[in-house]
Image (tube, grey):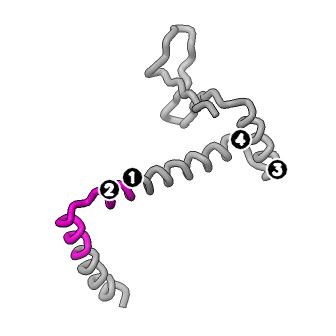
C-alpha cells in the first residue's frame, strides 16, 4: 500500500498550488490509496462519524505506537549504569508515592 503524501506550503513546488496546511486549524491535504479511502469512508459511514474523525483516531493511535517504539528502543539501549539508576529512581518515587496517597 503506498504511503500517504503530505503537501505543505513548506515543500510546495509550483506557485499555483494552494497552501494545504494551516497550523491554526490543523488542515492538511493528503493523497490516499483509493481502496484504503473507500474502506475509511465505509467505516466512517457505519459508525456515523466523519472521515476526519477516523483519520484523527488513526493518527493518534499511530503516534502512541511510535512513542511506545521509541520508549522500547530507549530502554533496550540503556547501559547497565543507566538501568541501575532507573531502578533506584523507581524505588525512591514508589516510596514517596506511598506518603503522597496515604
Crowd rating for badge 3 (residues with CA inside 10 Å; few <14, some 14–19, many 20+) = few
Q: CA distance from mark 4 to mark 2?
A: 35 Å
Residue shown at 54% from the left, 28% from the top: 6
To which residue does mark 3 refer? 46
Q: CA distance from mark 3 to mark 1?
A: 34 Å
To which residue does mark 4 refer? 51
- Between label 4 and label 2, give the one nearer the viewer: 2
Report x, y in % for residue 56. Answer: 60, 46
Q: Main secondary structure of the magenta part?
A: helix
Crowd rating for badge 4 (residues with CA inside 10 Å; few <14, some 14–19, many 20+) = some
> Is the residue under label 2 in contact with that under label 1 (CB below 8 Å)?
yes
Q: Secondary structure at mark 3?
A: helix
Report x, y in % for residue 10. Answer: 44, 22
To which residue does mark 2 refer? 74
Q: Looking at the rendered structure, which numbered label has been put on residue 70?
A: 1
Q: Quadrant of the N terminus?
A: top right
> Is the residue under label 1 in contact with that under label 3 (CB below 8 Å)?
no
In this rendering, position of residue 19 left or right of residue 74? right
Q: Residue 52 occupies which quadrant of the picture?
A: top right
Mark positioned earlier in the residue sequence (4 or 3): 3
Q: CA distance from mark 1 to mark 4?
A: 29 Å
Q: Looking at the rendered structure, which numbered label has been put on residue 22?
A: none
Report x, y in % for residue 45. Answer: 81, 45
Mark positioned earlier in the residue sequence (1 or 4): 4
Amino acid at each position: 500500500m503506498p504511503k500517504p503524501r503530505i503537501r505543505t506550503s513548506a515543500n510546495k513546488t509550483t506557485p499555483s498550488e494552494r497552501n494545504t496546511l494551516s497550523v491554526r486549524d490543523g488542515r492538511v491535504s493528503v493523497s490516499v490509496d483509493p481502496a484504503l479511502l473507500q474502506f475509511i469512508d465505509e467505516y466512517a459511514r457505519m459508525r456515523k462519524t466523519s472521515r476526519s474523525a477516523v483519520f484523527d483516531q488513526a493518527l493518534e493511535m499511530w503516534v502512541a505506537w511510535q512513542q511506545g517504539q521509541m520508549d522500547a528502543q530507549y530502554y533496550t539501549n540503556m547501559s547497565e549504569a543507566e538501568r541501575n539508576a532507573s531502578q533506584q529512581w523507581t524505588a525512591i518515587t514508589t516510596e514517596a508515592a506511598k506518603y503522597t496517597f496515604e
